[in-house]
Amino acid sequence: MKQIKLYTLLPTTDGSFVAVLPFLSDAPPKEAKLLFDGTPHVLFYRADKESYVWDYLNPDAIEPMKKMDKILIFEVDISSQSIRWEYWARVIQTTENPHVTLEQTR
């Protein structure tokens, strides 16, 4: 499982977030979803065989994330300064999210 090392969560006026990620793939996202168990670790499934871990969420983001059922994601190509993909991902609240950390992704 790959780790997304650089991402930004931008707060919105309704108390949720927009996620800005680095450009991940030429393939379009398909049924994207996040598994969130209330800890600083999120599992992100972008497509069928494409999964990532977001580690170390800002503590201020945890409580608002517990109330979210979807998140708007932008994948940005930093070199061309353009948005490559824009899509919604379901946020699935779970108590059984396996904790994957940076050490386990090496």
Image (spheres, helix red, strand yellow):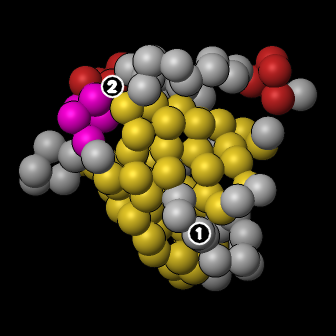
**Residue 97 point in image, percent of width and height:** 55, 23
Q: Residue at (39%, 44%) from the top-left corner?
A: 91
Asked if residue 66 is among those painted magenta in the image, a careful observer would answer yes
Residue 80 rendering spot, x and y as whole percentages:
64, 81
Relative image position of residue 86 (x, y in whole percent): 45, 74
In the image, what residue type sits under mark 1?
Lys
Residue found at x 50% / y 51%: 33
> Which residue type carries mark 2?
Ile
Viewport quadrant of the N terminus: top right
Q: Which residue is mark 2?
A: 62
Mark 1–mark 2 Cα distance, whole angstroms, equals 25 Å
Which residue is labeled 1 in the image? 30
Q: Is residue 15 left or right of residue 8?
A: left
Q: Which quadrant is the C terminus positioned in?
A: top right
Viewer-side residue, 81 vs 62:
62
The residue under the point 30% across, 34% down is: 65
Q: Residue at x 82, y 29 (%)?
A: 105
Task: Out of 94 and 59, give the one closest to the viewer.
Answer: 94
Q: Residue furthest right?
A: 106
